[in-house]
Image (tube, rainbow, N blue to C red):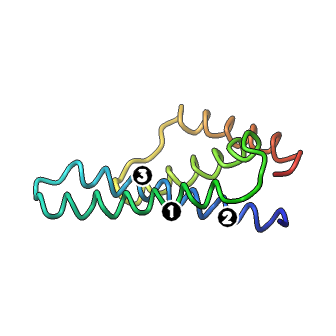
Amino acid sequence: MRYPTALFLLLVAALLEAGGDAILRAGLHTSFMTRRLLLFSGGGLILLAYGCLINAAPWSFGRLIGVYVVFFFLTAQVIAWLAFGQLPQRGVWLGGALIVLGGLVISAGRV
């Protein structure tokens, strides 16, 4: 698999995981049982799709997850901001910079 394709699939996987988590979070905080069940079901299916996508490719698992964490972190920050109005604080920015730097180091060996 070509490297740009692998990175694109990691981005899609991050969107699925962070999005599925956000949907489950919304389900936990709703008081309507029907809506809660729908959100749990939808979030669960999205997380299942994430699990299938991330584990289907024949990549080195350790390196894959190392690079994937960068995509997950960035995606989670965008979703936290858009869906929940939560802006990252200084510590999150600093930790995120280290995560991205680590992903670049791991990525130098290619997925």
List the residue tagged with mark 2.
9
Q: Position of residue 78 (x, y in %)?
A: 49, 56
Using the numbered discs, state the Cα–Cα distance from disc 3 to disc 2 in whole angstroms: 21 Å
Amino acid on which disc 1 is placed: Ala
Q: Residue at x 27, y 54 (%)?
A: 26
**Mark 1 or mark 3, whichever is nearer to me:** 1
Q: Which residue is at the far left?
A: 32
Q: Residues within 10 Å of mark 2 (few under 14, many from 20)?
A: some
Q: Nearer the viewer, residue 9 or 103?
A: 9
What quarter of the picture does the N terminus occupy? bottom right
Using the numbered discs, state the Cα–Cα distance from disc 1 to disc 2 in whole angstroms: 12 Å
Using the numbered discs, state the Cα–Cα distance from disc 1 to disc 3 in whole angstroms: 21 Å
Q: Nearer the viewer, residue 23 or 84?
A: 23
> On the picture, is 67 further left or further right than 29?
right
Q: Secondary structure at mark 1?
A: helix
Mark with earlier residue (3, 2):
2
Vertical position of residue 95 compared to residue 80: above or below? above
List the residue tagged with mark 3.
80
Q: Nearer the viewer, residue 95 or 50?
A: 50
Q: Secondary structure at mark 2?
A: helix
Q: Residue at x 58, y 39 (%)?
A: 93
Label number found at residue 49? 1
Q: Position of residue 101 (x, y in %)?
A: 75, 39
Amino acid on which disc 3 is placed: Ala
The count of marks equals: 3
